Image: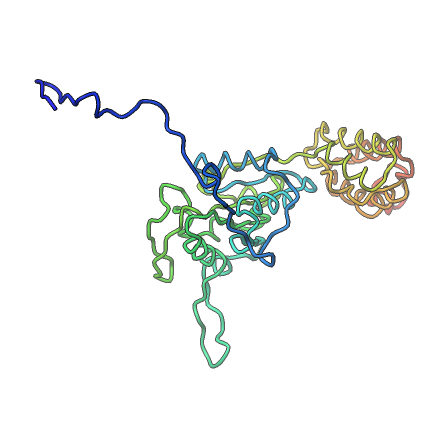
Amino acid sequence: MTATADKLEFPRSSLRSEAKVRALNAEALGLPFARPSVPAEDTLPCEIEDDDNRLQQVRRLLNDGYAGVVLSGPPGTSKTWYAKQIAAKLVDLDKRRVRFVQFHASYQYEDFIEGYVPREEGDGFNLVEKHFLNMCNTAKEAEGKLCVLVIDELSRCDPARVFGEALTYLEMPMRNQPFHLASGKRVAIPTNLVFLATMNPFDRGVDEVDVALERRFAKISMEPDVGILRKLLTQNGAPEDLQNRIARFMESLQSNENPLCRLGHAYFRSVADEDSLQRLWEHQLQFFFEKTFRLDPEGLRSVQRFWKQLFGRAGDGKSEAEKSSPAE
């Protein structure tokens, strides 16, 4: 080795090759190798493939550093189904690393983070860890493997109130940083715990979703899908002509001026023929549209007329309220 004024010079024979070195694994060396398997009783069912578009979207968004992803769309667009499928893929089908909860109007911090429950024996109460802290513990024990908490109907309550102090620490830069809960307990959210949620953007509770919470989650729009609709109808054995007419009806709703009338493909999952379609109309869809157009009678009549044009037997174009009104 020789020295100059500005650098050290090493004999060329000591320099490493600039050629790329191929990483070797057990498979490359011809050694027997098997991935750790999940016991059959702990395996989640899954119907999507690794190359599924929405699964890939979720993976990319999580890699971008979001705390979780919200599947947002009108009713019947397979949000809950997809959340379960994607969660199964993210945890390698290991149900021990995933938990499903559903928010509702009375859901509170005490149901999600921690709360007092009556003691089984004797008087008084015990402070019990709930879903969120249980999943934090699961993630800590998972040795870096991804764990997922799935929240169905995120906007059915006040989610910022439900998350409480944990809201700030959902952000990835804040992970593993200890903080105190209202009880004084010191906790930290592991980096390998992520969230999947579903939400109907037209729910009344959406306006109450805290902006700070929304900023920590990415969103994927879940829209009515004619392709999935046709797949469902084909599986049921519905004739092609009937499929075409149902597709026309659903497509017409997507362009309606009232966004609340967008109808998801899952509404038609039990339709196999004209009779089952008419039962769907008489026992569900007509009530759905009457509620959707309760302030727009002409909008309701327009939907009823188009239904009758395609399928017949859609009534006389009057809402149930109008039918029960006394004649002038």
Position of residue 293 measured from the top left corner of the image (x, y, whole percent): 74, 38
**The N terminus sits in image quarter:** top left
**The C terminus sits in image quarter:** top right
The residue at the far bottom in this view is: 122
Residue at 48% from the left image edge and 61% from the top image edge: 130
Q: How many marks?
A: 0
Position of residue 309 measured from the top left corner of the image (x, y, whole percent): 89, 30
The one of 18 and 102 positioned closer to us in this rendering: 18
Position of residue 27 measured from the top left corner of the image (x, y, whole percent): 49, 39
Q: How is the image coloured?
A: rainbow
Q: Is residue 52 above or below residue 33?
A: above
Position of residue 150 measured from the top left corner of the image (x, y, whole percent): 55, 49
Judge from the rendering whether residue 153 lies leftward or rightward of residue 160; answer left or right. Answer: right
Q: Is residue 45 above or below residue 315?
A: below
Residue at 83% from the left image edge and 48% from the top image edge: 283
Judge from the rendering whether residue 172 lies leftward or rightward of residue 153; answer left or right. Answer: left
Judge from the rendering whether residue 185 lies leftward or rightward of residue 60; answer left or right. Answer: left
The one of 19 and 38 positioned closer to us in this rendering: 19
Residue at 61% from the left image edge and 45% from the top image edge: 85
